[in-house]
Amino acid sequence: MDDEISAGSSDSAESTAYWIEWFQSLKGNEFYCDIDEDYILDRFNLTGLNTEIPHYALAFDLITDALEDDLDDNTRVEVEKSARQLYGMIHARFVITARGLAKMLDKFRHAEFGRCPRVLCENQPVLPCGLADTPGIKCVKLYCPRCEDVYSPVARRHLAIDGAHFGTTFPHLFLLAYPNMIPTKSAKRYTPKIFGFKIHQNAKEQRRQDEIREATPGAPRSNPPTTPASVLDSP
């Protein structure tokens, strides 16, 4: 009996490879790591998803290559959509496990998620991040551990990835798990200049005061500055 159960589990684990391999091969899905089959097959890890994903049972069968029902075209399209959402939500849970973090570490080391677009971050590799844990709200963003800001992906194909498939926790837990991956914060700051001269602090103060006057009804309007040298500092 034990041998039969073991053999059945092995067959089920092998069967999950096909849909997952197809999904991973789709252009734009490079951000996803390969979820271990035994993680997917453990229903404890999927607790609560049955109430969030439409056609949950059919979507799960599709992911595990166990879908045998003859479905009409419209239903199959809906089930396929649900399967992608289900895999994405399982992925959000998997990447915060020790095994998932290790797989994402390998991707991070190879800068597979891209690099920070901020010039002064000097091509720092970034991490995928969600701005919400609920699907359908925001697409995936990229978190830079050097400047600690988030950016939209450069490639348009990544804009279709739901941010909830990575969640709000992943990048920060990742850096806690691998503190050696935290980059040194850059001390460089961009300095605005006009003809090589720094902009004087008084000019910023004048601009702020003008904005306050413009926003205040009845306040007198100031004349535009006539002396460019007054807004310039020494180089």
Image (cartoon, rainbow, N blue to C red):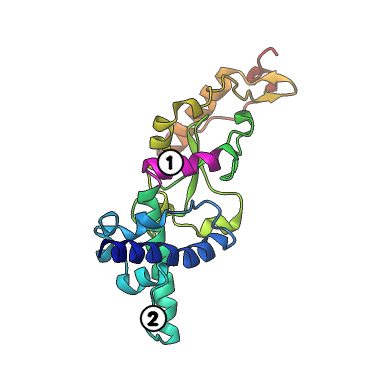
For the residues labelled 2 and 1, the Cα–Cα distance comes to: 34 Å
Q: Which mark is residue 101?
A: 1
Give the residue drawn at x 68%, y 12%.
234
Which of the 4 image quadrants contains residue 59?
bottom left
Q: Main secondary structure of the magenta part?
A: helix
Residue 149 can be seen, yes or no:
yes
Residue 52 can be seen, yes or no:
no
Q: Secondary structure at mark 2?
A: loop
What amino acid type is highlighted by mark number 1?
Answer: Leu
Residue 83 placement (x, y as % from top left): 40, 68
Q: Secondary structure at mark 1?
A: helix
Give the residue drawn at x 53%, y 28%.
207
Which of the 4 image quadrants contains residue 62?
bottom left
Question: Closer to us: mark 2 or mark 1?
Answer: 2
Quadrant occupied by the N terminus: bottom left
Q: Is residue 26 magenta?
A: no
Give the residue drawn at x 47%, y 51%.
140
Q: Is residue 134 left or right of residue 187?
A: left
Front-lying residue, 110 or 187: 110
Q: Is residue 227 above or below residue 143?
A: above
What amino acid type is highlighted by mark number 2?
Answer: Glu
Residue 14 placement (x, y as % from top left): 44, 63
Mark 1 neighbour density, 10 Å: few (under 14) some (14–19) many (20 or more): many
Q: Is residue 107 magenta?
A: yes
Residue 98 placement (x, y as % from top left): 38, 40
Q: Give the residue pinned by disc 2.
A: 68
Q: Is residue 86 above or below residue 125?
A: below
Q: Residue furthest right?
A: 195
Q: Which one is earlier in the sequence, the residue at label 2 or at label 1?
A: 2
Q: Are marks 2 and 1 in contact (CB under 8 Å)?
A: no
State the extent of the magenta-drawn residues as a range.
95-108
Front-lying residue, 109 or 158: 109
